[in-house]
Image (cartoon, helix red, strand yellow):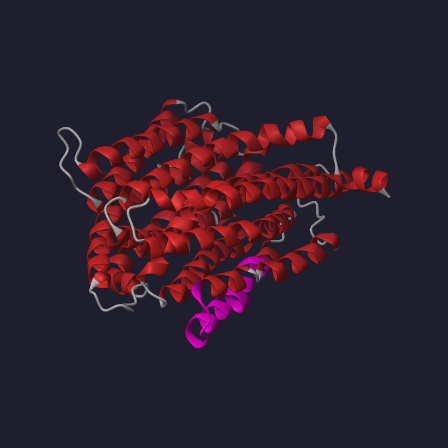
Amino acid sequence: MLTKFKKKYIGNWDFYRRYLLLAIPMILQNAITNLVSFLDNIMVGQLGTEQMSGVAIVNQLIFVYNLAIFGAVSAASIFGAQYFGKGNHKGHMYSFRFKLYATLLVTGGAILLFLMKGSALISLYLTDTVGNGATDVALKYGQEYLAIMMVGLIPFAVNQSYATNIKETGQTFIPMLASFVAVGTNALLDYLMIFGIGPFPKMGVAGAALATVIARYIEALIVIIWAHMHRAKNRYLEGAYTGFGIPFAELKAILVKGFPLMMNEVMWAAGMTTVTQCYSVRGLDVVAGLNIASTITNLFNIVYLQLGSCISIVVGQYLGAGKLKEAKDADNKMIVFSVFCCVIMAALMFVVGGFFPGIYNTSEEIKGLATRFIAVSAIIMPFCAFSHASYFTLRSGGKTVVTFLFDSVFTWVIVVPAAYLLAHFTGLGIVSIYFLVQGTEMIKVIIGYYMVKSNVWVVQMV
């Protein structure tokens, strides 16, 4: 029995070596990015609860935009890597054009929405349960932060178009280097501009936004300039700006295969943001506590998130090569390894997570809420690791419609209604509500288990 279990779910050293060589750079890059976000959050948190809450709400809105951009580029990336692999640089160029058009269209829509409805969107998260006017102050800081952050949306969109195409050619170093430079710049400017160090004026939340915008422009410039200076390595740029069209066949293929992926990213992000809005009806303290908890949780989540992403790469390679048996074997072992690593990270977060809220300049009530939210997230994390691995297993076989149902439809049919009903129509405390809503992940685990076991994803697409 034990021997059979080991053979099915535990790999040898060479297997884990290959897996980790792929995963560790991705984990490190995301660790640095999330660490800087954590430091940024702490620095804004030193300004006060209203400032921290206003920034956190705007970042929820920006989060939906970011996921829409990722969905837009992912749709074309499904084909971009295959075009490059076949040496079809013209096809790769068309996928690049699609990314530029799609990301700029999403960005234009987002800017228009924020200009017209920005204040109303921020106000959705502000419920004055105390009557001390704190929500009005948080709204003012949120508007100030959003006005500056909009300036950084265009370079982010263009950078994603270039960086994803560069990665499809197998060149991951430059996008990673640009990311490191950007997060380092962001962290330094945050410190100088938020608190007014040296010749810099004390700008508070405006300084935090300006630091992010400057960092985004620097990151985009590094990637774009490098790409155009190395045309031999970036053949997709040949003719990219000498015309505007995309052949109907290529456009149709990208839209048909990629549209569910695009919609999934947008609807899932919107669903998560709606869940947060449901929690926010319990007061500004809840918004602040969730902000602290989610920032810390993101630091610990990166391991299972990146291990899950690697599943689609490794399994996808086996499927593409027609090695269906090897794909199933690798998938079993990687899912178990991802969950095992996540159990360790969850235990660590449960033990040390409670120390982080003490760093923030806020009330003891908010610190207590954040500590309990972190504990709940730690308990649920291993289940999230399994459902995340299941998602990328299904995605590796090109089951974009299935992943759409599994991810965003589940969120809107199960998670959002649960959060809304519990927050609005029960007398349960917010921590209990948070636990029950997070606990819906168990349903997703069961669905994911049976879908992976059914082998519906074991498909050779190319």
Residue at the extreme bottom:
425
Query: Which residue shows up at 36% across the image and 27% down it?
Result: 228
Q: Which residues are magenta?
A: 404-430
Query: The C terminus lies in which quarter of the figure?
Result: top right
* Position of residue 335 measured from the top left corner of the image (x, y, whole percent): 67, 44
Query: Which residue shows up at 74% across the image and 29% down it?
Result: 12
* Position of residue 42 measured from the top left corner of the image (x, y, whole percent): 32, 42
- Give left or right: position of 168 versus 296: right
Residue 418 in magenta stretch: yes
* Position of residue 347 measured from the top left corner of the image (x, y, whole percent): 57, 43
Q: Looking at the picture, does residue 372 appear above or below residue 227?
A: below
Query: Which residue shows up at 46% across the image and 26% down it?
Result: 173
* Position of residue 350 measured from the top left corner of the image (x, y, whole percent): 52, 46
- Give left or right: position of 394 versus 29: right
Q: Looking at the picture, does residue 269 appear above or below residue 355?
A: below
Q: Looking at the picture, does residue 293 appear above or below residue 234?
A: below
In this view of the protein, which residue sits in the foreground, 174 or 98?
A: 174
- Give left or right: position of 440 versus 93: right
In this view of the protein, which residue sits in the foreground, 74 or 427?
A: 427
**Res. 121 image quadrant:** bottom left
Residue 64 in magenta stretch: no
